Amino acid sequence: MKKSIYSLVLSDEIVQKVDELSYQMRTSRSNVINQILAEHFSCVTPEMRMQTIFSGMEALMMHQFRILEQTSAHMLAMQSQLNYKYKPTVQYSVELYKVAQNSQAGKLRIQLRTQNQALLLSLEQFFKLWILLEQHYLNTNAEYQLSPGRLERSLRNPDAEESEFGELLGDYVRRFDRYLKAWFSGTPAQELETAFCEEAQNIQKFI
């Protein structure tokens, strides 16, 4: 949705209310006014589309993950605890673009903050295994960035309604988290590959 600069004359009381709302929503004054007018005229803004996607995700994930406070209209973050010694926490962050970039809707980050080298090594091994499984069993053009304790993956812009896209995203993150926990529970890579192969058709919907 294209945006332009306009000059408006508003009462101080209205501006104060808008500023209070923008502070609560952690966004700009212009964005708040834009969303209020969009709702009034039944227009769908990128921010509204993102919230529909995130709502679809939260509906699937609230009982399995700890949903973090949303600090941006473009991002949703959640945490899951690993069954590993001191119960480290993995954070999943989904960032969506206002406009698709090279057919990509956004990116998913999986991150674990720790200084435990054994944990980091095991996590890196799982990340590499997951990438290999996706590249082998799925017809994907996803881009991956791997660094210590962190994996970043591009998200395809699917031919789906916002609510369905949210459900696909939520299902993908839940599936990834399930495989990750199985890995740290001692499930061999071969068993994970067999399970992944059997589920590849369902995962393909998202890719």
Image: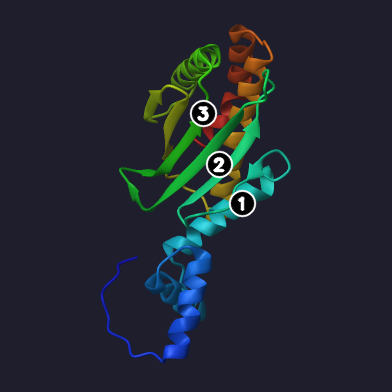
Across and down, in percent, residue 133 comes to 50, 18
Whether residues under marks 3 and 1 lie with C-beta atoms below 8 angstroms apart, the answer is: no
Tag 1 secondary structure: helix
On the picture, is 97 further left or further right than 5? right
Q: Which residue is mark 3?
A: 113
Q: Earlier in the sequence, mark 2 or mark 1?
A: 1
Check residue 127 in the rendering and tell me which mark sits there, or answer none: none
Comparing 90 with 182, the one in front is 90
Q: Quadrant of the N terminus?
A: bottom left
Across and down, in percent, residue 109 comes to 47, 35
Kindly tell me whether residue 202 is visible in this rendering: no
- What colour scheme governs how the chains and residues are painted in the rendered image of this protein? rainbow
Badge 2 amino acid: Leu
The number of discs equals: 3
Q: Quadrant of residue 63?
A: top right
Across and down, in percent, residue 72 comes to 47, 55
Q: Residues within 10 Å of mark 2 (few under 14, many from 20)?
A: many
Which residue is pictured at 44% across the width and 64% down the height? 27
Q: Earlier in the sequence, mark 3 or mark 2?
A: 3
Instruction: Calculate the distance from the C-alpha at mark 3 to the C-alpha at mark 2.
Output: 23 Å
Q: Which residue is mark 1?
A: 56
Residue 71 to residue 150: above or below: below
Across and down, in percent, residue 153 comes to 43, 32
